[in-house]
Amino acid sequence: MRSCFVRIGAIGLALLALAGGAFAQETSTLPNGVAAGDVTQITAVLWTRSTALGTVTFEVDRDANFARPLAVASAEATDPLLPVKAQITDLAPGTRYFYRATNAAGESAVGVFRTPSAAGRRDGLRFGVAGDWRGELAPYPAVANAAERELDFFVLHGDTIYADYPSPALPAGQAITLEDFRAKHAEVYGERHGLNAWAAVRASTAIFATIDDHEVTNDFAGGAAPDTDIRFRGDAAALINDTQLYENGLQAFQEYNPLNDEFYGDTGDPRTANERRLYRFRTFGDDAAIFVLDARSFRDPSLPNVSEFTAEQILPFIAATYEPGRTMLGAAQLADLKADLLTAQAQGITWKFILLPEPAQNLGPLNAGDRFEGYASERAALLKHIVDNGITNVVFIAADIHGTLVNNLTVAEGPGAPQMPTGVFEVTTGPVAFDAPLGPTVMELALGLGFVTEQQANLYRLAPAALKENFITQLVNGQIEPLGYDLIGLDGSEIDAELIKGGYLATSSYGWTEFEIDAATQQLRVTTYGIPYYTAKQLTDAPEKVVALQPAVLSEFVVNPR
């Protein structure tokens, strides 16, 4: 069991209420609430957005009454769409802190975070991960229970806005200007229909965040030349990650998350030299380490996806994925990841969570060009590094594909080479809100490609949730089994796992995933929560019904460490 001071509990919640700052709190001039994040054992970044211009004061204390604050910092709100941040230092490891933001109008909002435990401690850990939420589908009841779970941190795992989709904040679609991107971020962290689920989550725990593609535009490749993509063509920059559209998107992302502004130095590689550095390596006692990756800013262009599922197209595609030097992560980020994995193993840390926004598991040739599967040479090098160095208990966590799929990872050293076990598995999570999620999308694609009949598709549409998931499992396995990849799930693998509830697949819902490490046994429990997915029309027609949806457990399994 965790030490009693780790959890906020009823007393902590009561103190927050007395301080005028329940988790869901927002005020007329603090419309996105507050957030804290990018925590280390001794530092944290505090965040808010004030529409009242002037000085914003941040106070930090171990008590929610703030009678004698341990730290006070201030920042100037100069633009109603521009958030303010302050870094707090000299904190103690493994400690819960309350914080309060008060603006020039005298309005306040309160939050709480916990610093990571010091090396040598096993206090247990509980954290959440989610990705993929569109603005027109706010206010996101799929995460409405996350603030109550008393998490140590939450990872916002990419596609935190959909800058290229119409929404109430920007009906025209693609964000262009910095103000456009700011408006899209303010939208998803704001109140709608009487609910602000993300403000509640962000005030309840520490936040880490990274991008996927839609923080800028769909499927962009930051390491490519602008003339390779019509949306960036005409910009004089040498690479997409220096174009104005990219810079606007990344600046707004950085502004709207409680993150330090970090940059690479002179790496010797124009892809990464002096560019924004979203990569994070953090340790949480001896329980876990996390490695948060940026899989967009430095990548080569995706390979064209196969259009016909024939050997004449699939085999050349697989061969092209092994082209030497093709990269998704960029050399500097990959080197950091490899070195930090070795460090975590040497320090005796049990679990290593690699947070890669796109899936690392092989899901077959359908739309594979954008996933790590489309960068097979680099994927193989990373997995071989893990295996060859005896790095144990590695878990990839992904989002992007709008559904939960769990599978162990295998690796082949080249096209046609045998698949070898790695002892690594992956959990994809989400979406918080993307219409339609993976299951219905796959079914419609399968229908269009002739993999299923109209009768089968109709049966799927009418089936209960469990049968829908079985149907999608069969479709996915039908793609991957002929290529020698392991089937969906952890049964029969070398992962010591036990399924407790549901299955290893949840694809017709909106939700998030929780990861919990038991302090005594170090057993990992993975729980996916979700609600039935809804459309923008359903939300508009009956918002009270959508807002009232309550997340339930869709999938739960445990894994014993090696």
Image (cartoon, rainbow, N blue to C red):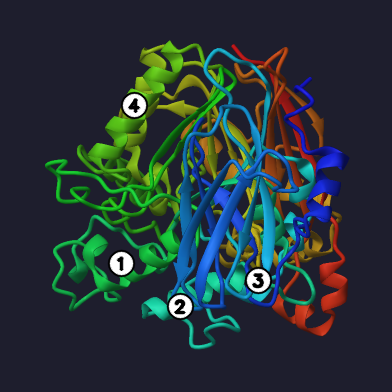
> Closer to us: mark 1 or mark 4?
1
Quick one: 494 or 291, which is closer to the camera?
291
When asked about the image quadrant of residue 264, the answer is top left
The residue that mark 1 highlights is 247
Tell me if residue 103 comes above or below residue 287 in the rendering. Answer: below
Considering only order in the chain, which callout, 4 or 2, is on the residue closer to the N terminus?
Answer: 2
Residue underneath mark 2? 79
* Badge 4 vs badge 3, beta-carbon distance below 8 Å: no
Q: What is the secondary structure assignment of the residue under circle 4?
A: helix
Can you tell which of label 2 and label 4 is closer to the viewer?
2
Picture quadrant where residue 134 is located: bottom right
Regarding mark 1 in the picture, which secondary structure is present there?
helix
**Residue 507 in view of the camera:** no
Mark pair 4, 3: CA separation: 48 Å
Residue at numbered disc 3: 106
Q: Is residue 126 left or right of residue 330?
A: right
Q: Callout 3: helix, strand or loop?
A: loop
Residue designated by label 4:
338
Q: Are dots 3 and 2 in contact, CB under 8 Å?
A: no
| Kind of residue sitting beneath label 1 | Glu
